[in-house]
Image (cartoon, helix red, strand yellow):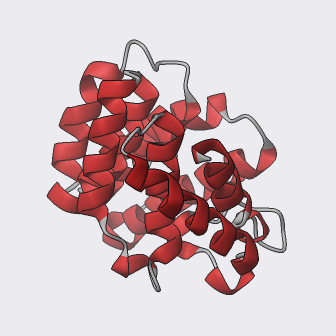
Amino acid sequence: MGLTALMLLQHARTPARLDADGLVVLLEDQDQGLWNRAMIAEGLALIDEALPRRQPGPYQVQAAIAALHARAARPEDTDWREIDQLYAVLERMTPSPVVTLNRAVAVSKVAGPEAALAMIAPLEERLAGYFHFHGLRGALNQQLGRADEAREAFGKAIALAGGAAEAVYIRQQLDRLQADAEKIGGPVSGA
């Protein structure tokens, strides 16, 4: 039940994951009107039936996280504290640097980007070849106004991009850093 709920909840958002040009749209920027509400309703019903059985497995926990995103009327209504707690449960069930990386996103929403950076710092060696690690590190540094660190992380991410949509998204972040730097005081080398 947990796996089916997870698959339905994740697949329901597919039409909103890329824009008309095929570029990545982050969850918080997705047009929820494009989400398949019938799939979401089916996924929510399954997870609501599975959770009271009190035998949670990793798929149920992941589906519960996806359900919190699906239930939020707007991205800013997302219950990030609950998502953080669910990822903490998932870390205990299936310890993984990728689970911790995902939890760091929730931590950044609850405790700020500095706390999330501290959480992912120990993962650097194990996730050195992982696009999402460097993308998140870049985004967190960008939020903190640390342009040089963000630029470095985004540079590593773009080199690891698994497809054109990911590479273009990171390029947009690098271009934004460049534009911000030029507003402040002229062009930045290496951008």
- Toward the viewer: 154 or 80? 80
Tell which of 60 and 87 is nearer to you. Answer: 60
Describe residue 145's horizontal placement relative to residue 101 as left or right.
left
- In the rendered image, is residue 35 in sight? yes
Residue drawn at (69%, 45%) of the image: 167
The residue under the point 39% across, 55% down is 52
Count how many numbered circles sit on residues in the image: 0
Report the residue at 53% width, 30% height from top.
Answer: 156
Q: Please tell me whether residue 127 is drawn above or below residue 60 in the rendered image.
A: above
Whole-percent x, y for residue 17 in the image? 70, 64
- Image spot of residue 54 (x, y percent): 36, 44
Specify whether 52 is left or right of 120: right
Which residue, as the protein is rendered here, is positioned at the far top? 125
Reply above or below: 75 against 118.
below
| Up/down of 106 relative to 54, above or below | below
At x 63% / y 54%, what residue is drawn? 5
Question: Closer to the camera, 184 or 107?
Answer: 107
Residue 98 quadrant: top left
Q: Nearer the viewer, residue 93 or 46?
A: 46
Taking the image as drawn, is residue 147 in sight?
no
Q: Position of residue 88 (x, y in %)?
A: 27, 38
- Looking at the image, the residue that sits furthest to the front is 53
Q: Would residue 186 be found to the left or right of residue 36 on screen?
A: left
Q: Residue furthest right?
A: 21
